[in-house]
Image (cartoon, grey):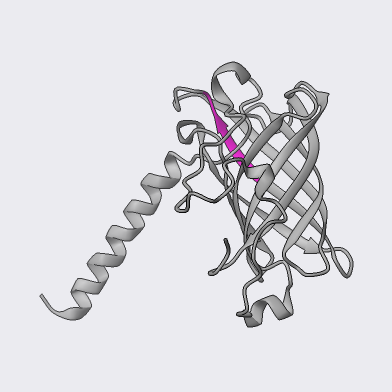
Amino acid sequence: MNTRLQAAMAIALMGLSTVAVTHKAQACGIDIMHPSAGIRWSLPMYRPSSNMHAAMPQAVGTKQVSRYRNILQLLEPITGLYEFTFTSDGTGNGPPAGVVADQGFVTWHADGTEIMNSGKPSIGGNFCMGTWTRTGAKTYSLKHYALNWDNTGLNFIGPVNIRENFTLANDNNSYSGNFTLDQYAPDGTTLLAHVQGTVAATRITVDSN
């Protein structure tokens, strides 16, 4: 089999794989329709060092700053990987005020896109994507979409629209602001639930604690 034929077959197989994955697309979103069974209010994080904080909110603001700089971070300071925490303010039909609604990891790309690994159980979808813009010298706005499934992973609840508005710290290593989460029915227009609160995040670097 010649090299060109092998490459063509590999590309075809990749295309079929992508179709299969897209057909069963899942993404993050707080399971506000089944809060007793679907939401983890405390995410059990893997911590390689025994002296690391066990709770995500305690980790905010405690990271060691990397001495290495990525050129893209000079162009777009938000660029990079962060630990984030969503805390509910009790508005709408979400968790009570002060309760951690979600926590996990988020990556901001210099091209204006973003991807989140949520603490939501993976069977309901825990990866989702968004697009962001800078609204000021240190302020940003995010529009983020998730696809929410029930706890069996078989029944589609509907799309979730998550919005964030926040300020990047002067050292570019953390940010804080607010979020809103709107859960829609499968038609994408019927609002089923609304949650809002605050967001806080800390940058992760190659030499973070």
The residue under the point 45% across, 46% down is 22
Q: Is residue 102 magenta?
A: no
Provide the major secondary structure of the magenta segment: strand
Splitting the image into 4 quarters, where does residue 27 fall? top right
62 relative to 118 in the view: left or right: right
Q: Would you place residue 189 above or below residue 134 in this image?
A: above
The residue under the point 40% across, 46% down is 21
Write the start and end of the magenta stretch as one range: 145-150
167 relative to 128 in the view: left or right: right
31 relative to 177 in the view: left or right: left
Splitting the image into 4 quarters, where does residue 148 fall? top right
63 relative to 179 in the view: left or right: left
Q: What x and y, as percent, mark residue 95? A: 73, 24
Tell me the quarter of the image containing the N terminus: bottom left
The residue under the point 36% across, 45% down is 20
Q: Residue furthest bottom?
A: 71
Which sits in the foreground, 16 or 167? 167
Q: Would you place residue 159 above or below residue 140 in this image?
A: above
Splitting the image into 4 quarters, where does residue 191 fall? top right
Q: What x and y, as percent, mark residue 74? A: 72, 80
Which sits in the foreground, 88 or 123? 88
Q: Residue furthest left?
A: 1
Which sits in the foreground, 76 or 99? 99
Q: Would you place residue 138 above or below residue 187 in this image?
A: below
